[in-house]
Image (spheres, rainbow, N blue to C red):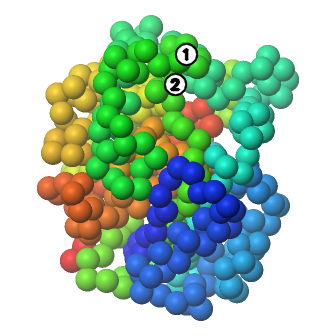
Amino acid sequence: MSFITGVGLTSFGKHEGSSSLDLMSKAAQAALDDAGLKRAEIDGILCGYSTVSPHIMLATVFAEHFGIRPAYAHAVQVGGATGLAMTMLAHHLVDAGVARNVLVVAGENRLTGQSRDASIQALAQVGHPDYEVPLGATIPAYYGLVATRYMHEYGVTEQDLAEFAVLMRAHACTHPGAQFHDPIEVADVMASKPVAMPLKLLDCCPVSDGGAAFVISRERTGEAGVRIRGCAQAHTHQHVTAAPALSELGAEISIARAREATGLAISDIRYAAIYDSFTITLAMLLEDLGLAARGEAAARVRAGHFGRDGAMPLNTHGGLLSYGHCGVGGAMAHLVEAHLQMTGRAANRQVRDASIALLHGDGGVLSSHVSMFLERVR
C-alpha cells in the first residue's frame, strides 16, 4: 500500500529567469510542505527527463541541487506517460519497503529556455530514425495521421475534436495557475492556424515553463488519505509505422490490467484525469478507456458529461491543452489536480465526488500507457 501524501504545482506559462532546476525545486518544496515532511525525510527520488537540461544523471543532479541524499534515485523516460510511470514505480518501491518517502518531481523552462527550432528537433526524435525522421515529420504530424484514420473509421469530425479544446479551456479559466484564461468556442478552434491537418493550433497543447511534484509514502500524513489502489502499463510499439490497429492500442490493455488488479469497474470512477496532448489524444483515450463508446466522446462533451458538474468530471484544471505542457511535469499536473479534488481542496473547481479517480498517461504516439486508480480513504 502507498499514499500520495503531498502535491506541489507551479503556474504554467512563462517563468522568465527560472531554470528547470528552479521550477523543480519550487514544486518539490510545495509537495513537501503539503505532506508535512522535511527534506531529510525523503529517502527516494524519481525524476522525469528534460529536453532543456538533458543530463544523463538528472535525478542526482536535482538531489544535489535540492540538498537531499536519497538512498534510492532514478530517472524515467517514457514520454508523456513518465509522470504516472514514476508514480507506479514509487508505489512499488514504498510497498516493497525499499523507501519510506519517495519524491517524484519534474519541471522544465521549455518555453523560455529552449528555442522553437530546438524544441521541434528534440521532439521529432520520437520518430523512427530510418523511416520517419528523414521525412521531416514532427509529433503533431504523427498525431495528425492518427486523427485522420480515426475520423475515417469512426465518423469523428474536426468540429467534434474542437469540443475537447473548448472544454479544457473552460476548465482552465477557473484555475489561476493556467497558461490560458480566454474562453474559446468551436468556431475559434476551427479558425485557428493549421498545424498538421486535421489538427489546428487550438487542437494542440502549448509549450510551457512549469514544474510539478508529489510525495509517495508508506504511511499517510494527513487526515484525508489518498492511496494508490492499483495501476498497470502497456507498451505496444514505439514508432507510428509499427503501431497496431486503432482497436488494439495500449490504453485498452493497461486499463484492463489495472481493473483486474483493483477489482474496480468503470462505473466506480468519480473523477477522470486523462492525458490530452492533442484533442485527438483525449478523444481516443476516453473511448479506449471505456469512458465513452467509439466515436461518441464528443457528444458526451457537448452534453456536459465531462464538465465540472457532470457525471464524470475531467481534467478540471484545464489539462495539457489549456493549463499547459512543460514536458513530464505537464501530465503530472493531472495527478496534482486529482489529489486536490480528492481531498476537497480544489476551491471553485471542486466537484461533488472524487472518491475514486482514474488517471491515464500516454507516451510517444499512443505508444506507452499507464492506467492508475486512486482511492480516498478516511
Q: Is residue 229 left or right of residue 109?
A: left
Q: How many callouts does the rendering have?
A: 2
Residue type at mark 2? Leu
Q: Nearer the viewer, residue 154 or 5?
A: 5
Residue 181 in the image: above or below residue 108: above
Residue 65 in view, yes or no:
yes
On the image, the x and y values in percent for residue 332 come to: 49, 56
Q: Position of residue 194 (x, y in %)?
A: 55, 16
Image-based side of 318 in relation to 248, left or right:
left
- Asked if 60 appears above or below 276 in the picture, the reply is below
Task: Tell me residue 78's x, y (percent).
Answer: 64, 48
Marks 2 and 1 close (CB-CB < 8 Å): yes
State the image quarter where residue 120 is shown: top right
In which quadrant will I find the N terminus? bottom left
Q: Residue placed at 30% from the left, 55% from the top?
A: 357
Q: Residues within 10 Å of mark 2 (few under 14, many from 20)?
A: some
Rendering coords of residue 69 (x, y %): 70, 86
The residue tagged 1 is 194
The quarter holding residue 68 reads bottom right
Q: Residue at x 47, y 26 (%)?
A: 203
Q: Residue at x 19, y 35 (%)?
A: 305
Amino acid bearing label 1: Pro
Give the residue at mark 2. 201
Q: Upstream in the sequence, badge 2 or badge 1?
A: 1
